[in-house]
Amino acid sequence: MSTTVIDSIGLLVTNDPEVGEGSLGLIRDAAVVIEDGHVTNVGPAGAAGDERYDAAGRCLLPGFVDSHTHLVFAGDRANEFAARMDGAPYVAGGISVTVNATRAATEEQLLGLARNRAAEARAAGITHQEIKSGYGLDVATEERLCRLAAELTDDVTFLGAHLVPEEYEGRADDYVELVCGEMLAACRPYSKWIDVFCETGAFDADQSRAVLAAGRDAGLGLRVHGNQLGHGDGVQVAVEMGAASVDHCTYLSDADIDALAASDTVATFLPATDFSTRQPYPDARRAIDAGVDVAIATNTNPGSSFTTSMPLCIALAVRDMGMTIEEAVAAATVGSARSLRRDDLGRLTPGSRADAVLIEADSYSHLIYRPGVPLTRTVFRSGEQVWSANPA
C-alpha cells in the first residue's frame, strides 16, 4: 500500500483541539500522511512517504462540507433575482418556476448541469455535498432527481415536501399523502435523508410531522427547512422529531434557541441565501453563546442562493452573523459534517477521509480577509488531487 504525504504545510487545520493549538487544532510546519484514502498521521513536516506533495508553506484545511444543496435542476431565475434587487420580496412560490423547467429537462441535461455545478464547488474547496431533490414534485421526477443525485453523493435527501405543486393547489393534505406514500417509496432506494419545508407558504407543523414520521418509518434520517421567512414552527418540529439538522434559522426565538441547545439538532445557517433574498442575517453569536451546535452551507439553488462558494458563506458569517473566523471555518467543515452525522469528514486527523483544500495563503483568515478572491490552490478528495489551480 502506497503512502502519500502532503508536506511542508505552513499551517494545518485539523479541527481537533487534542492534536493541535486552539479550537481548530492548528499545527505549524506540518505534514499529513495518507494511506488508502484516509489520514493515518498528522505531525511535523518531513514525514516519509512514497509520494510527496509540497505545500510550500501554504495553509491546508479540511475540505469544506456542504450539507445543504439543491444541485439537480434545470433553468434559472435571474429575472426573479433582479426583481428582488429592485425591492420585490422573496416568496417560496418561486420554486414552481424551477419545477416546470426541471420536469421538462432530460436526464442527460440534468446530470450534466449537476456535474458542472459539482465541479464548480470542487474548485471552491468543497469536497463533499449533500444533494436534495425537490424540483420535481411528482413521483416520476422526484425519483429521477434522487437517482441522479445518488451518482454524485452518498448523502441524498428526498425533498418531495418542498412546496405544494400547482396541480395540488388547495389540496395540500392530499399532496402530503402522496409524498408520504408512493413518492417516498419511489425515492427511498436512492435516499439517506428526508426533508420538509416547514414554513408559511409551504407546509404547516402537522403536515411536516407527517412527512418526517413517514421518512423515519422508512429508515431515513430527518432534516428540516425552517424559520427562514419569519418566526415559525420549523425549529420546534425539528427538535421534537429528532432531526439531524434544521436549516436557515434566520428567525430564532429564545424558545427555539433553548430547544436547539438542549438537543442534538444542528442549526445550519445559509448566509448566501440571506444575502440573495435581502433577508436579515441570523444572529449566530446569540445561538453559539447559548450552546447551539452550528453549521454553514451554501444552499446552492437557482432561486435564493445561486452560488457554490463556501468562502463567500464563511465571509458573510463573520461579517454579518457575529461569528469569529475560527467558528465560521469550523462550521463549514466539522460543523456541517456533524449535521450529516458524519465523523469521517470535516477534519484532518487519523481515520478521517483525506479530503483537504490547500489555499494560496499562509492562514485560513485570508478566506475572509480577501473576499471574492479565488484562493483555492489544490483540492484533495480521499487523498487524490481532484482539482488544481496549476494542473500539470
Image (tube, helix red, strand yellow):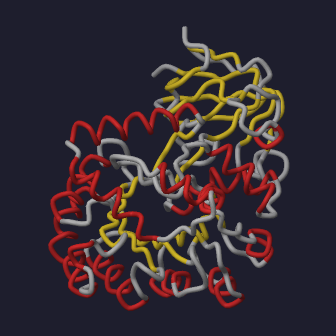
Q: Position of residue 54 (x, y in %)?
A: 69, 16
Q: Is residue 208 left or right of residue 364?
A: left
Query: Which residue is pictured at 65% across the width and 68% down the height?
Result: 279
Relative height, residue 102 to residue 265 (above, below): above
Q: In this view, does 89 lie to the left or right of 289?
A: left
Query: Which residue is pictured at 53% across the width and 24% down the height?
Result: 387
Q: Where is residue 376 in the image (x, y as percent from the top left)?
A: 66, 29
Query: Which residue is pictured at 38% across the width and 58% down the height?
Result: 132
| Residue at the limit of the structure toward the top, as seen here | 392
Relative height, residue 30 to residue 367 (above, below): above
Q: Position of residue 242 (x, y in %)?
A: 47, 80
Residue in the foreground of this view, choosing between 308 and 23: 308
Residue in the foreground of this view, choosing between 388 and 24: 388
- Residue 61 occupies which quadrant of the picture? top right
- Residue 257 occupies which quadrant of the picture? bottom right
Q: Position of residue 164 (x, y in %)?
A: 31, 75
Residue in the foreground of this view, choosing between 87 and 197: 87
Q: Is residue 269 left or right of residue 368?
A: left
On the rendered image, what quadrant is the C terminus found in?
top right
